[in-house]
Every structure is written in C-alpha cells, then in structure tokens.
Amino acid sequence: MAVYSTGAAAPVSVYSAQDVIMKFNRYVLFLLASMALVGTNVGLGKSIVVAVPVMLFALLRFVIGVGVLLPVYKPARMRAVRRSEWLALFLQALFGTFLFTLFMLYGVSHTSALAAGVITSTIPAVVILLSWPLLKERPGPRAILAVALAMAGMLIINTTRASGGAETSLLGNALVAAAVCCESIYVILSRRLTQTLPAIEICAYTHLIGLGLMLPLGLYALWHFDLAGVAAATWLQVGWYGLAASVLSFWLWMKGIRHVPAQTAGVFTAALPVAAVAYAVVFLQEKLLPVHGIALLCVMAAIVIASRAQPAKAAAEASA
C-alpha cells in the first residue's frame, strides 16, 4: 500500500487562493482516485484469495510491481544508497510490503470486506498513536480525539457478528489490524528516509526487497497449486491488483499531493473506506448494517481530524 507515507515528504507547491480554486478539481480527483483504488483493492483481494493461495497471490503482486518499476532500478543510483538507508529500506519492506500484504490478504479471507475497509482506514490515527513512543511526538488534543474516534470505529466493527461467525470475524479483524500497524510503522520509518531518497525510489526498493522475502513462500505455494484451475478473469484481477497496489495508487497520490497542501490532502483518505464499503456491497453482496455506518462515520471523522492535527510540541510552538 504505502500511499499514506507520501503526504508529509512530498514537495508541496505554493499557490494563491485563485490558483488553488482553478486546480482544485483536477488534483483532488487524483487524490480521490488513489484512495479509491486502495479501498477497492481490499474487496478485490478478498475475491482473489478465494481462488488463489495467499502466498502465491502475494508473490505475483510483487512480481508485477517490480516489473512495472524496472526503469527505477538504476545500478549507479542503487550503489549510492548508504548502508544505513538500506537497513531502513529493509525494515520498511518487512513491515510495509511483506507483512502488510500477508496480514491483509489472510485477514480479508477471514472477515468481511466491509470490516476490513473500515479497519484499514484507521491508519492515520494509528500513525499518530505509534509516533508517540517511536518518534516522541506527543499528540495534541485533536490527535487524541482522532485516535479515540478511530478506536471507537474498530470497537464497533469487532462487536458486530460477521456472516462467518464471531470467532472467524475477530480473527480476520485482528489480522487486518496487524496489517494496519505494519503500514503505520512503514509510514513512521519513511518520514526520515524520504529526506534523502526520492519517494519513487523508496517504493521501488521496498518492493524489490519484498519480492525477495516473498519468493521462497510464493514458490512453495506455486509448487503445490494447479494454475490451470484458475479462471482467466481471476488472473486479470491479480494483474490489476498488482498494478493498482504497487504503482497506480502511488503515482496518483504523488501527482495530487504536489498541488494540494498535505493537511488538506489527508482529508481525502476518507475515500478509502467509502470505496471499500461500496465495493463490498455492490460486487460482493455484503450487507451494510447500521453499525457499519456508525463505524464508518467514526473512522471518517477520525481521518478528517487526524489530517489537521499537530503534535503537542508543534502546536505549542505555533501558538507562541
């Protein structure tokens, strides 16, 4: 996924109010499209793992991503990356691509796409929560409120019985929550790395490392799986998932964030749960219950508040 990490590090152009109004529609659409792809991928992944083993699907996702990103892998540039940066890249790949992908795909196979979409949308709030012990960024009042709303949304989801039963739903929700934590750690690690490496190179290198981590597991799954039993339409879905998750969502977000202030852009991550819920209802025929709506509103409110929140230290400096 790794889309959330691009906001703080990406260069943001300065425009007059008139320029912002003129450019608003086009670049906002880029941000919305990026989050819509991430959201629909939650439900699409659930559809795919019914027919393709998780390990094999994850491997193919990385193969597609690395294949599309091949022009980024320039030996001279890669040799210039310092050892400490490669260590940071490995940790980002471990949490943000390898573990995130496994937890997310196994999670959606055990819970509804509705629940997974809402839980995934708590990433901004979890980043705030984890930044406290990891970066010593004490959250301000708005940040605390955002975290509280996000946690309320997750609590509501976890107390709702899924069609597969309470235990199955709780297992799937826990796995998706683990994916959220992994992605949040990726975001936190990227804050420093993006000061020295371009975001597209970070994306490419972490996918390459993720491919190396996934290769033995994916090949084992491939050895015990009959590829001929998978419909052509499913393979097309796998190809689209890999392209959207690795490249398209990232490119669209980077394109939009360059022309929209980062705090404003954060609001548009609210498109993620909306897209996930829409896909689940329309394509997977999942039933949208009132409790899902309440959880969705809690998470969307958390996203809006989190996008405008400041660490307590920064807020104090701004008011001084």
Image: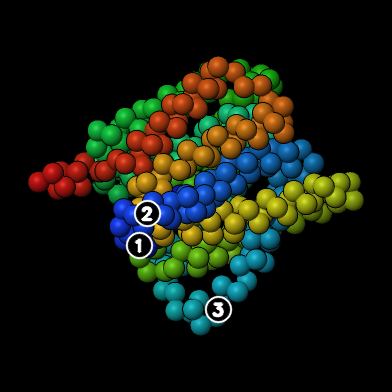
**Residue 9 can be seen in this image:** no
Report whether 251 appears left or right of 40: left
How far from the left and from the top, in percent, is residue 287? 66, 21
**Residue 266 can be seen in this image:** yes
Identify which residue, 114 or 308, lies in the foreground: 308
Write down the residue under mark 2: 20
Of the two numbered discs 3 and 1 on the same chain, state the one appearing first in sequence: 1
Write down the residue under mark 3: 74
How far from the left and from the top, in percent, is residue 59? 69, 55
The answer to whether residue 155 is above or below residue 202 is above
Residue drawn at (66%, 32%), measured in percent from left and top?
Answer: 280
The amino acid pointed to by label 1 is Ser
Write down the residue under mark 1: 13
The amino acid pointed to by label 3 is Lys
Of the two numbered discs 2 and 1 on the same chain, state the one appearing first in sequence: 1
Of the two numbered discs 2 and 3 on the same chain, state the one appearing first in sequence: 2
Dot label at residue 53? none
Residue drawn at (80%, 46%), measured in percent from left and top?
Answer: 234
Residue drawn at (62%, 22%), measured in percent from left and top?
Answer: 288
